[in-house]
Image (spheres, grey):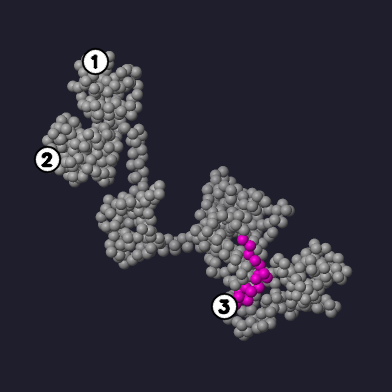
Amino acid sequence: MKSIAVVTDSNSKLAVFLKDNLKEIFGGLVNINNYYISEIEEGFVIEDDLVLVMIEERLIAIKDYVKDISKIIVIERTIREKEAYKIFSIPEGMDVLVVNDNKETTLQIVSLLYEIGINHLNFIPYYEEREYPDIKVAITPGEINRVPKYIKKVVDIGDRCIDFLTFMKMINRLQIHNDVIQKRLMKYSDTIINIGNGIKEQYKDLYSKNLEMDTVLNQLNEGIILANRDGKIIVANYSALKILDIGEDIIHKNIYDIFEEDLKKLSSEKVLKDEVFKFKNKYVNVNKKVLNYLGMENGILINIREITEIKKLEQNLSSKLREHGQIARYSFKDIVTRSSSMEKCIRIAKKISDSNLTVLITGESGTGKELLAQSIHNESGRRNQPFVAVNCAAMPENLLESELFGYDRGAFTGALKEGKKGLFEMANNGTIFLDEIGDMPLHLQTRLLRILQEKQVMRIGSDKVIDIDIRVIAATNRNLQNLIDVGEFREDLYYRINVLPLLIPPLRYRKEDVLLLLKYFLKDKYKFNGEVKKIIEEYNWPGNIREVKNVSSYISLMCEDKEITEKSLPFYITDIDDDFSKEIEILNKKLGYEKYFYTLKTVRKLNNEGISAGRNNIIKELKRENLNFTEAEVRSVLKIMNEMNIIYSKIGRGGSEITKKGEKILNRISNGI
């Protein structure tokens, strides 16, 4: 049992009082021993766990008799609450003599009285060598015999008891965390006036919070061990003891002494991140980090989990997410490319993954916008959270609103009686992918803008807002700037979602990927002859990767041997079974014979001469034929022919190239067909 030494000048009533005072808190749990300076002999050593003295002077007097002077505490004392009422009975403004056993303790009493808020009196310290003939009232803490006889009224406030903060200091020094002691101290604090105003209430709150925290920590499946900067353990929950098979209380033990040989790395390494240890036929995952306070190392935190528990959690989470379709299946490794433009796009996307900012993916239909969105999610810190995808163009307007934002019970006829979570709520802590955002109705765009600004969602029929933490990835194959110009898309929403723009190049601008993708989808089971390769490369692939996948399915069904021929390809790619009458009819109707024929003829001429078939060069050639087409007319013709796969228009200054289909159409028109 630990012990406390109480050192006083002599075996006085003060010595007895202090021992009894200490017993109020420590009785039966700590030994309390009295020592008297007048009786201590040379060579005597006080070896108790704590040594209490009344004033600084006594600390100097006894330090040579104490084994460890760091164990000495100069106690602070206060008065009982009931004694303070006697002082308040003294009329305001009076001079009051304060009498104690010596000058230092007298000044302590004066300071104490002012500190606890008794400031309606003028306190005057008593010195024996002086006279105080005009003073009528004196206050003393049990030293009535020292009060001058001419003082008419004496208020005895009794022996000063040990202050609450001193008891707290003693408990911490003794490292005793006992419910009995804490309850006694709480009860004791109600009987005294604390030197530190409000400390009593703070301690009560702290005591309650500690109980709550212990309850919470011991409910966790994860093991938690917290040690101070010297390695002394101050928190260890039940799970930590269970996982480590420790059957004893390790509080106050040193963290560097408790681990067995196969866990020594826990002691030797300063930082551990998701380290796996084999321990007593089981595997544990360990994280360890140093806690810092104001730039100084202040403690050590260790988290321990059994691998089997982690696997169970992962399985449960994956199962729940799959049940709701809220999981991203693809990552960057699933993107097949050798194109420099696509590789650049992937590099940018990977950088974007590290951020929580909103992403806008633009690209033609079938380029893989959702695949890229899922890859960004799976590369981000939200990878273990939901990924919710919604196609804004695929649902009716009224259904889209209720799906996105959810609704409260009774919000509309046919609503579920318990209400329903919206997709934004379901994506909380994860990512929501808004595909085809250019087709979102204007009034829903307004609600989306508010969500992005406030990070809050309100269900239909509700007046309550719900805080959400989501990342938004939007995608569209439409030109949002054009939609803004015609009033179909909000400009403020555009700038809100276009924080991290990402453009996926269409397949016609990365022809080197077409054959690679076909081989990938066909699992490299077939060979492509030279003619087929040329057809594939010349085709514009307006449906992009989705169309490539469809063609691969067609080939796998139609190809009768291991070599792919023209007969194994769909007719609209080879044009074998088409006389182009339908295409020519469309061209005549949309453009007129003269515009498309001479423009196409000019493109082929420039291609054959190795000159860029850009708009300016096409207009110059047409003028030589006495054809004055405006730049807008040429742009329109090229756009329509590009969409019909008659020409292939390159980005920038690359100009246009006539395709195999364009050659055939031009030849048939030239031959009068």
Q: Which mark is residue 152?
A: 1
Say which residue label 2 marks: 42
Q: Position of residue 86 (x, y in %)?
A: 28, 22
Q: Position of residue 268 (x, y in %)?
A: 32, 60
Q: Position of residue 244 (x, y in %)?
A: 30, 60
Residue at 62 percent across and 55 percent down: it is 498
Q: Quadrant of residue 24?
A: top left
The range drawn in magenta is 502-519
Residue at 66 percent across and 62 percent down: it is 477
Judge by depth and name the residue closer to the eye, 363 or 344: 344
Mark 2, other Cα within 10 Å: few <14 / some 14–19 / many ≥20: few
Say which residue label 3 marks: 523
Mark 3, other Cα within 10 Å: few <14 / some 14–19 / many ≥20: few
- On the picture, is 475 further left or further right than 232? right
Q: Main secondary structure of the magenta part?
A: helix
Residue type highlighted by circle 2: Glu
Can residue 647 be seen from the camera position used here?
no
- On the picture, is 453 further left or further right than 125? right
Residue type highlighted by circle 1: Lys
Can residue 369 be seen from the camera position used here?
yes
Q: Position of residue 31 (x, y in %)?
A: 18, 42
Nearer the viewer's eye, disc 1 or disc 3? 1
Judge by depth and name the residue closer to the eye, 375 or 307: 375
Does 498 appear in magenta?
no
Residue at 63 percent across and 62 percent down: it is 503
